[in-house]
Image (cartoon, helix red, strand yellow):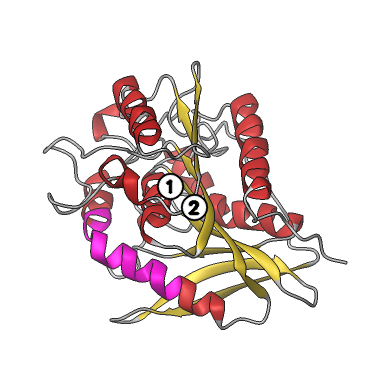
Amino acid sequence: MITLTRPEGTRPEDLRLSRRSLGLAAFGGYAVYAFSAQAEPIRTDDHGLVCETVLLPAADRQVPAYVARPDAKGRFPVVVVVCEVFGIHEYIRDTCRRLAKLGYVAIAPDFFVRAGDPSTISDFNEIRRIVATASDAQVTGDLAATLKFLKDQKYADRGHMGITGFCWGGAVAWLACERFKDFKAGVAWYGRLSPPKPTEFLGEADRKWPLQLVADLHAPVLGLYAGKDQGIPAADIEAMRAALAAAHKKDCEIIVYPDSQHGFHADYRTSYDPVAAKDGWARMLAHFAAHKVAPKPAT
């Protein structure tokens, strides 16, 4: 049984992998390093949806992205889904389908494509290497390419776009709302807020983190955090709350689930907390709806 306890995934000493978990994860398309053999992940079908891989026009190459959207005419509001350190695996794809069923265009860019596919890897040192290559400039550029792609699609409502992200992607969601005016709202699931310790692996030493750019927020962000997260101390959450108040970001809010662990929404892990996950999902949808990113059910 595997429990991930940190926003960057976990450390090798945190867990031991079983052959059964590896086999089940590979068969189901889940991240092999994090999958629990005891998990019963939510599985969302693609009936009534268009699900496809598209290519985004980044500066240095085309970047693949998974898209799920209603199979219907018209323009639909958009949610960009930012992955964990494990990349685009079945949990992320299923999250996109869940959103598409509600009436969103959900798109998940592959930020790690240049270095490899962390979802298929059981060696955590190799996952660390892949994630570390995703520099701040590259991630920001890939988000810009995502927005450019969406603005050219007849099915996307460019005036109603939000972003959500998990773990590594939670920090990206905060930063995206700090850097892009296109997003009307963001939801960050247990994303790191402040610079990591020197021993961590999250990219270049001088990259910016959400707490450092609060004053630049263009859109309200809902933060969903876990009280038992070993990688995000309560002091960081309180510092973020204070920074938001000081910057007069009144529509931002941080919710902490005191008995939950990092990754409580990830239904393929032992850290999954169905009560917190359900509540957080409902809060996310309400936050989007309150800030011009309400779903448009297909007719």
Q: Secondary structure at mark 2?
A: helix
Q: Nearer the viewer, residue 124 or 286?
A: 286
Was residue 132 drawn as part of the magenta stretch in this picture? yes
> Which mark sits nearer the N-terminus, 2 or 1?
2
Q: CA distance from mark 2 to mark 1?
A: 6 Å
Residue at 25%, 35% (x, y): give it.
12
Question: Relative to 231, is 143 above or below?
Answer: below
Q: x%, y% of residue 278? A: 66, 32
Q: Residues within 10 Å of mark 1 (few under 14, many from 20)?
A: many
Residue flagged by tag 1: what amino acid is it?
Val
Q: Position of residue 289 (x, y in %)?
A: 68, 48
Q: Nearer the viewer, residue 125 or 212?
A: 212
Q: Main secondary structure of the magenta part?
A: helix
Residue 15 seen in this snapshot: no
Residue at 68% x, 61% y is 104
Look at the image and say whether residue 284 sits in the magenta stretch: no
Q: Which residue is at 80% across, 66% downward?
A: 48
What residue type is disc 2 on? Ala
Q: Which residue is mark 1?
A: 32
Judge whether 192 appears above or below 109 on screen: above
Left or right of 157 in this view: 204? left
**Front residue of this view, candidates 268 and 159:** 159
Q: Secondary structure at mark 1?
A: loop
Residue 100, image quadrant: bottom right
The vertical placement of 102 against 40, above or below, is below
Q: Which residues are magenta?
A: 130-146
Number of other residues with Cα within 10 Å of mark 2, as a class: few under 14, some 14 to 19, many 20 or more: some
Residue at 66% from the left image edge and 82% from the top image edge: 154
On the image, the x and y values in percent for residue 288 come to: 63, 49
The residue tagged 2 is: 26
